[in-house]
Amino acid sequence: MEITDKKSATDKEYPFRSSKYSRKRRWLLLGAGVLSATMTAGMVVAKAQTTSTGVSGYPLPTVHTQQAYSPFDTFTSRWTRADARQIRARSSLTNPTGGNSLPARLTMPSIPADFPQTNPDVWVWDTWTLIDAKANQFSYNGWEVIFSLTADPNAGYTFDDRHVHARIGFFYRRAGIPAALRPRNGGWIYGGHLFPDGSSVKVFGSTTLTNNAEWSGSTRLVRAGDNHVSVFYTALGFNRTADGTNITPPVAIISKANGTIHSDLKHVWFTGFNNHTPLLQPDGVYYQTGQQNEFYSFRDPFTFEDPAHPGYTFMVFEGNTAGERGARDCTAADLGYRSGDPYAENLDDVLNSGATYQKANIGLAVALNKSLSKWRFLPPLISGNCVNDQTERPQIYIKDGKYYLFTISHRTTFAAGIDGPDGSYGFVGNGVRSDYQPLNWGSGLVLGNPTDLNQAAGSDFDPNPLQNPRAFQSYSHYVMPGGLVESFIDTVENRRGGALSPTVQININGANTAINLAYGNNGLGGYGNIPANRADVDIVAFLQDLRSGNDSSVTNPLVALASVGQ
């Protein structure tokens, strides 16, 4: 999800998006810039040899100890420019035009252009599951359930305008059926909007709005063996002119709504969610506000309990470093170069490059009560100042005693002088708050779309004809139990998506990850293969739902009850 309105960016910040340049001329100019950068730095890489001290022609990554700190400490780790430059350093720039520059083990396999739609009545993008405090994925009384941002493809707006109209929808299907035995599109049944119409807008009070939308978050099963759920999501309010220009900055409020899940033998449904509680708005101290930057990021709450700190519930979310938009306050620590590194950048050169517009961070908050209705900000876990502007949908993933912080980002949101693909990025440490080490050679890249780093990025809505036709094939990657990774299809060979991607699997070993090509068909599993690894069985609620769900097929409650465990 992006708050950034690409159409309203200034020519100074994005000069080649200006209307005074034809589309063809823009690509020629951008291509020339990429070629120039490649000639001055990348040609060395084509012949570079990996050594014990790094890749010749590129700096060493920043030293990160993975040391754990108290979650309540003020320490913030940095994803530095020295780190992020390892993406290009570890890629090959000798690929043919439109090919893939990325390391094979970090490349998302190519999605077929004839992919199926998940549902013809809705576009589907950011998707998450029914989880507990440890991120286990639950089926409910024999049904798997997922939640997605959805929009109506027949409502008259374009695929790229869907964000302003986003509603959280839900899907369900019978649990435990192997992907090979399901329909090609995954077999998900669309259940409709999760929240009652008009309920989520209430969190804005009397604020003047022209549109409101429901953006990504997470859904918590309150207790195993129960049917109560809490949804943490981002309420977005827009006040815009007819052409999409902001009259006032968008209002982002991390919010919570409680409801109840129900099922019978035929379907799943929800009740409740009438009352929405605003939890957090950016403070301007740790997290940038709309008044500081109308294109700020503040969204995507993911809640969890840390086994090292029992009794506390935490939340990670996407933010931006507080301060005025474009402020020249990146430091040498944000660059992260080791003393005497011959390939280090000069701080003034970075500040003059426009990199100061990129100030991503991953935030942390702690709940102040058991009902999780009151929260307090803590300092960010990671900053990406002068590196990237978006670290979306962060999540904590614990494996073998290590804490993995996964996020997603775009090629077009990297700062000047930094390059990387659309995809998943990750960091590892010894606790929730750590001196996080970026995964895979210190780069942070975990799973990128096939991308030709020799060519200008283009975008999903304005593709560069010289770029790999799958550079924007999938996005919003979410790492599930067992290293399974789900995402949605954006653009494949100029065909727009709005559907669930094939699930893939990554192997995670310490500070390294790799795509598992033995999974599925050459690494691609089933479309929307999002399996539960735990079962929530609520017998009392199930018997009540049989009576209230109008399921005329039920003749014997004992037979119906037996189906719950199938």
Image (cartoon, grey):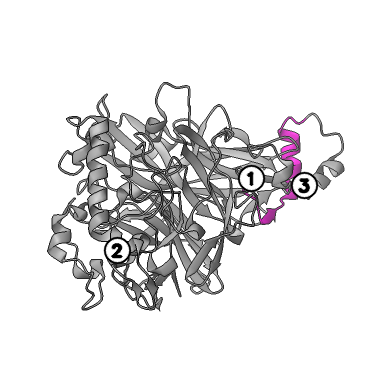
**Closer to the camera: disc 2 or disc 3?**
2
Q: Earlier in the sequence, mark 3 or mark 1?
A: 1
Q: Is residue 272 above or below residue 240?
A: below
Q: CA distance from mark 2 to mark 3?
A: 61 Å
Q: Which residues are magenta?
A: 530-551
Residue at 36%, 75% (x, y): give it.
64
| Residue 487 at least partly seen | yes
How crowded pointer 1 is (Cα within 10 Å; few <14, some 14-19, many 20+) is rated as many
The residue at which mark 3 appears reads as: 564
Badge 1 element = loop
* Residue 526 disc label: 1
Q: Work out whether residue 4 or residue 379 is closer to the camera in this orientation and state it.
A: 4
* Residue 278 disc label: none
Q: Work out whether residue 549 or residue 474 is closer to the camera in this orientation and state it.
A: 474
Q: CA distance from mark 2 to mark 1?
A: 40 Å
How crowded pointer 2 is (Cα within 10 Å; few <14, some 14-19, many 20+) is rated as some
Residue 542 among those drawn in magenta: yes
Residue 358 among those drawn in magenta: no
Q: CA distance from mark 3 to mark 1?
A: 24 Å
Q: Work out whether residue 168 or residue 419 is closer to the camera in this orientation and state it.
A: 419
Q: Earlier in the sequence, mark 2 or mark 1?
A: 2
In the drawing, does residue 52 fall left or right of residue 135?
left
Residue at 64%, 40% (x, y): give it.
186
**Closer to the camera: disc 2 or disc 1?**
2
Do the CB atoms of the residues marked 3 and 1 lie less than 8 Å apart? no
The residue at which mark 2 appears reads as: 44
Q: Measured from the top left, where is residue 377 in percent x and y? A: 34, 61
Which amino acid type is marked by label 2? Val
In the drawing, does residue 510 fall left or right of residue 71?
right
